[in-house]
């Protein structure tokens, strides 16, 4: 497998769950708040957002499922913090998409020009 | 990234007919994109592109649905949608190749749309993160630069 093939395969396997997890504005705001304060609970987050504690808890489950947050028990509540590596991974997947199309277009150009030259002979 | 899309242009020294064939036919797609492709360039047709040897460890199958075919001017398809779902504007990325005859050759106008719906704004999140933490390693710093370029060029 060439480097180019590996790169395209990586893009193709863009993690749909990860994308939809960060695709929601409320969840992005929550990640933002968690990053700003280091950690938080459903209660502290709902105090900073226009949504109920129950809704926040549901969003936290989604984030937990894709590994974007870590959870640990703290007294009677669960305390959440952002998994920095997984967040960087999500961002890197998005960033790799543009570079991949540049590489694909270069290959399209090479193939088409090779065909055009062989036809001209 | 104003409209949540990637846009690229590239001049190719070949006729639009040749370029169209290259961007739309499975035998060529398997050269510039995947390791194999099973796809009919017919509107509405669903197919798959395979990275690696199908079924082998590490291989990956991506589903693709053709949207528009207008040889030799336009070829578009949707991909990156959940298995079993019908691709639409909200759950997939739309890739469009528009081919414009240019000075004896062809300019390819490539767009890939749908990032906003699929969470492109993680990039903004990353920027906020950098503000708060200020401790990104060099890898992520270059990523930020790259994202900025991406936004500036699209």
Image (cartoon, coloured by chain):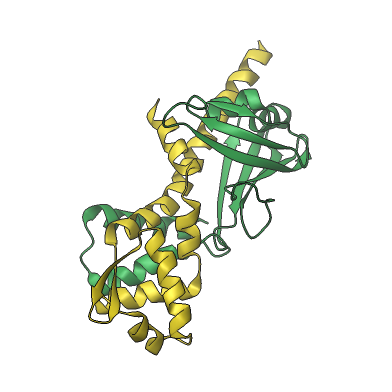
Chain colours: A yellow, B green
Quarter of the view holding residue A111:
top right
Q: Position of residue A1 (x, y in %)?
A: 40, 25
Mark yes or no: residue B124 visible: no
Viewer-nearest residue: B145 or B33? B33
Mark yes or no: residue A88 visible: yes
Q: Eyeballing the image, is A57 above or below A105? A: below
Q: Eyeballing the image, is B45 above or below B25? A: below
Compared across the picture, whether A9 is left or right of B6 comes to: left
Q: Eyeballing the image, is B147 above or below A77? A: above
Q: Position of residue B84 (x, y in %)?
A: 64, 47
Q: Position of residue B57 (x, y in %)?
A: 42, 29
Viewer-nearest residue: A53 or A116? A53
Quarter of the view holding residue B42:
top right
User: What residue appears at the point 40 percent right and 60 percent down from the top-left corner?
Assistant: A65
User: What residue appears at the point 55 percent right and 31 percent down from the top-left corner?
Assistant: B50
Viewer-nearest residue: B36 or B110? B36
Compared across the picture, whether A90 is left or right of B84 comes to: left
């Amino acid at each position: 497998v060439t480097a180019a093939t590996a790169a395209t395969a990586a893009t193709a396997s863009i993690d749909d769950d990860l994308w939809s997890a960060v695709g929601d504005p409320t969840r992005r705001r929550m990640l933002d708040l968690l990053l700003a304060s280091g950690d938080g609970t459903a209660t502290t987050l709902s105090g900073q957002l226009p949504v109920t504690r129950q809704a926040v808890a549901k969003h936290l489950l989604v984030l937990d499922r894709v590994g974007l947050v870590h959870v640990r028990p703290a007294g009677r509540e669960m305390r959440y913090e952002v998994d920095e590596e997984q967040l960087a991974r999500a961002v890197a997947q998005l960033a790799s998409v543009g570079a991949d199309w540049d590489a694909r277009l270069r290959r399209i150009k090479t193939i088409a020009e090779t065909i055009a030259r062989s036809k001209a002979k | 990234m104003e409209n949540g899309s990637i846009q690229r242009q590239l001049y190719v020294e070949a006729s639009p007919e040749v370029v169209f064939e290259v961007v739309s036919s499975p035998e060529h797609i398997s050269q510039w994109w995947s390791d194999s492709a099973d796809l009919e360039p017919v509107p509405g047709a669903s197919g798959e592109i395979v990275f690696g040897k199908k079924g082998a460890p590490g291989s990956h199958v991506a589903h693709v649905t053709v949207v528009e075919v207008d040889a030799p001017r336009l070829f578009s398809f949707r991909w990156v949608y959940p298995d079993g779902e019908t691709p639409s504007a909200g759950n997939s990325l739309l890739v469009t190749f528009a081919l414009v005859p240019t000075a004896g050759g062809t300019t390819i106008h490539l767009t890939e749309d749908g990032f906003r719906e699929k969470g492109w704004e993680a990039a903004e999140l990353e920027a906020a993160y950098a503000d708060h933490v200020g401790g990104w390693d060099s890898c992520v710093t270059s990523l930020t630069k790259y994202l900025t370029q991406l936004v500036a060029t699209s």
